[in-house]
Image (spheres, rainbow, N blue to C red):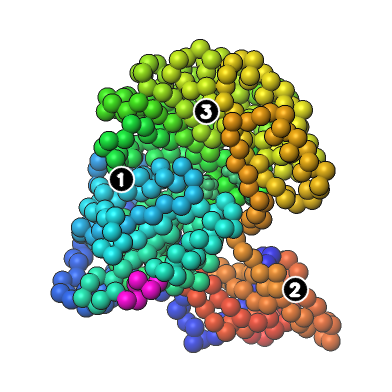
């Protein structure tokens, strides 16, 4: 699908139907109190019915002028323990979990395990309880992964099982709510809501703070979504809840997102731009873990060693970044900030008897300071994950990795000289677009040459931002609603008899035949102009 502007003949019967349900984010800016009370119906179905009506009428009434005045006032620092004011269409009572039991299920990488604890920490503060028994749950949240097709297929299959659970649920219990969190929510967005009608909540990786509101909206029987990515969300103030009191190790998230744009990878699109958590808040968490007696901390991030804390102005100097020799970036060189070497130094000083690891790094960000520190400090583990992805320079270029095989091998030698006895591991992708047998042989030869301690091997899985139909086109009507229609031949009103196909920038007349909560669908009638359509429609 490619975007087209379109003039649309919207059927009257559709009216404003699609706008009646809560749509993306349209309401999330409002933060003032509602004076309306919550529903008091006793049975869960009646309660839900009443709640829906009550909620819809509050939604229709919308925020008042006072609400806007309040949200326009100067922003104030909020303490994490403070309970947020509810948006105007929700009461405080609705925003709280009311002892509903949440079952969280995690898929994918360690970042997702950490995100699960962040989501839980936010929900716990809001009055939800956690359960490890699926049958007991009132809310089921899946923290999802999009990195390969197989990861997503697992979630679709799981959703089918949960659908059965939802339909079998006795009417005497409150309705079961299902939420998709994380990368898959971000990649597929409304496709999930449209395809799986029983999904109530969608929350992208930067929207977990909004979970209490999204669940409150879902309580009224409407689907709710927030897939906004942020430039600065690091959840620095949300300490993950330590779920296992006898644990001896923990993960500490230090940065989120990725700016590298490797051509095979969906992560920059699902997790957004790179941003780092302030050093002080990381040290605070590590100190707490040390006091609790933990013996190992793993610093966590999509590109952990690209860490750059820009929160303190005095460190935002013009000193440019040292990359590993022979490595380049896909983005404009960044400057200043407190870098990974500084953080690693500080973290390793917190408790000399606490081991420090980090994952997952990018090979481009191993300047000598980092290698030296790993060598010097007894408590920094001599273990480096160095994802190569391929042993063929030709494939590495197509992958936009920013290094050649030769530069990578030179880095390996340099690391081994700087940190004798270091353990190395790597990720590899086989079957990338255009990869030949010769390229593959080079990957195998790199594996033999480096002699890694561990390797993670993946079959290439093609990722797109969202599944787009090759036979459908998409445009927006005057009211800015998305309209989807099949790519078909049509008449051009300016050239009667001429059959044309719509091109980007064309105005077309579309007859609307159906609507979902987010989009209209129809079929194309003719190519037109704004003037002609206003005169003849
Ligand atoms: N197909 C297969 N493997 C992938 N990875 C990332 N994207 C893809 C993809 N589209 C692998 C890379 C990365 C690891 C976390 O997952 O090897 O380092
Ligand atoms: Fe983690 Fe990557 Fe999967 Fe997202 S896509 S959950 S970052 S492995």
Q: Is residue 486 above or below residue 372?
A: below
The percent position of residue 494, horizontal first and vertical second, equals 80, 80
Q: Is residue 251 above or below residue 515?
A: above
The percent position of residue 188, horizontal first and vertical second, equals 54, 61
Q: In the image, which is nearer the foreground, mark 1 or mark 3? A: 1
- According to the image, label 3 marks what residue? 308
Secondary element at tag 3? strand
Task: Examine the residues drawn in magenta and state their main secondary structure.
Answer: helix
User: In the image, which disc is placed on residue 469?
Assistant: none
| Mark 3, other Cα within 10 Å: few <14 / some 14–19 / many ≥20 | many
Mark 1 or 3, nearer chain start: 1
Quarter holding residue 391: top right
In the image, the segment drawn in magenta is 163-168
Q: What is the distance, in whole Å, between disc 1 and disc 2 at their CAs?
A: 50 Å
- According to the image, label 1 marks what residue? 121
Q: Closest to the observer: 11 or 217? A: 217
- According to the image, label 2 marks what residue? 502
Mark 2 or 3, nearer chain start: 3
Q: Is residue 498 above or below residue 6?
A: below
């Amino acid at each position: 699908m490619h975007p087209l502007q379109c003039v649309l003949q919207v059927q009257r019967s559709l009216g404003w139907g699609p706008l009646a349900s809560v749509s993306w984010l349209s309401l999330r800016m409002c933060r003032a109190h509602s004076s309306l009370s919550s529903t008091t119906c006793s049975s869960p179905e009646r309660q839900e019915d009443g709640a829906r009506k009550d909620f819809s009428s509050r939604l229709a009434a919308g925020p008042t002028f006072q609400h806007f005045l309040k949200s326009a006032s100067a922003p104030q620092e909020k303490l994490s323990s403070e309970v947020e004011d509810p948006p105007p269409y929700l009461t405080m009572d609705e925003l709280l979990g009311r002892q509903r039991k949440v079952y969280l299920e995690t898929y994918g990488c360690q970042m997702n395990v950490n995100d699960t604890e962040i989501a839980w920490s936010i929900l716990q503060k809001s009055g939800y309880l956690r359960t490890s028994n699926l049958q007991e749950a009132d809310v089921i949240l899946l923290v999802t992964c999009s990195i390969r097709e197989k990861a997503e297929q697992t979630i679709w299959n799981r959703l089918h099982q949960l659908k059965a659970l939802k339909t079998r649920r006795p009417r005497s219990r409150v309705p079961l709510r299902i939420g998709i969190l994380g990368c898959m929510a971000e990649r597929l967005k409304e496709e999930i809501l449209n395809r799986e009608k029983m999904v109530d909540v969608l929350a992208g990786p930067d929207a977990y703070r909004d979970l209490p509101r999204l669940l409150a909206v879902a309580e009224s029987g409407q689907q709710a979504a927030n897939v906004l990515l942020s430039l600065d969300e690091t959840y620095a103030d949300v300490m993950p809840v330590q779920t296992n009191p006898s644990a001896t190790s923990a993960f500490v998230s230090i940065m989120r997102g990725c700016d590298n744009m490797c051509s095979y990878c969906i992560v920059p699109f699902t997790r957004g731009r790179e941003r780092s958590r302030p050093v002080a808040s990381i040290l605070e968490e590590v100190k707490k873990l040390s006091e609790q007696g933990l013996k190992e901390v793993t610093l966590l991030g999509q590109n952990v060693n690209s860490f750059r804390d820009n929160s303190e102005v005095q460190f935002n100097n013009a000193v440019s970044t040292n990359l590993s020799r022979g490595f380049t970036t896909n983005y404009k060189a960044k400057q200043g900030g407190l870098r990974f070497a500084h953080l690693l130094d500080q973290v390793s000083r917190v408790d000399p008897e606490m081991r420090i690891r980090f994952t997952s790094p990018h090979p481009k960000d191993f300047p000598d300071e980092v290698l030296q520190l790993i060598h010097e400090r007894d408590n920094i583990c001599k273990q480096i994950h160095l994802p190569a992805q391929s042993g063929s320079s030709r494939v590495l270029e197509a992958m936009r990795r920013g290094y050649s095989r030769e530069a990578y091998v030179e880095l390996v030698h340099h690391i081994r000289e700087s940190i004798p006895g270091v353990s190395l591991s790597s990720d590899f992708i086989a079957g990338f677009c255009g990869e030949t047998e010769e390229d593959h042989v080079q990957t195998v030869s790199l594996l033999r040459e480096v002699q890694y301690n561990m390797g993670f091997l993946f079959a290439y899985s093609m990722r797109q931002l969202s599944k787009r139909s090759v036979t459908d086109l998409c445009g927006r009507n005057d009211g800015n609603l998305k309209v989807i229609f099949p790519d078909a031949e049509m008449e051009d009103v300016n050239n009667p008899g001429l059959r044309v196909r719509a091109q980007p920038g064309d105005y077309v007349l579309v007859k609307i035949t159906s609507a979902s909560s987010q989009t209209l669908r129809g079929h194309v009638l003719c190519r037109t102009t704004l003037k002609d359509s206003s005169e003849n429609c």
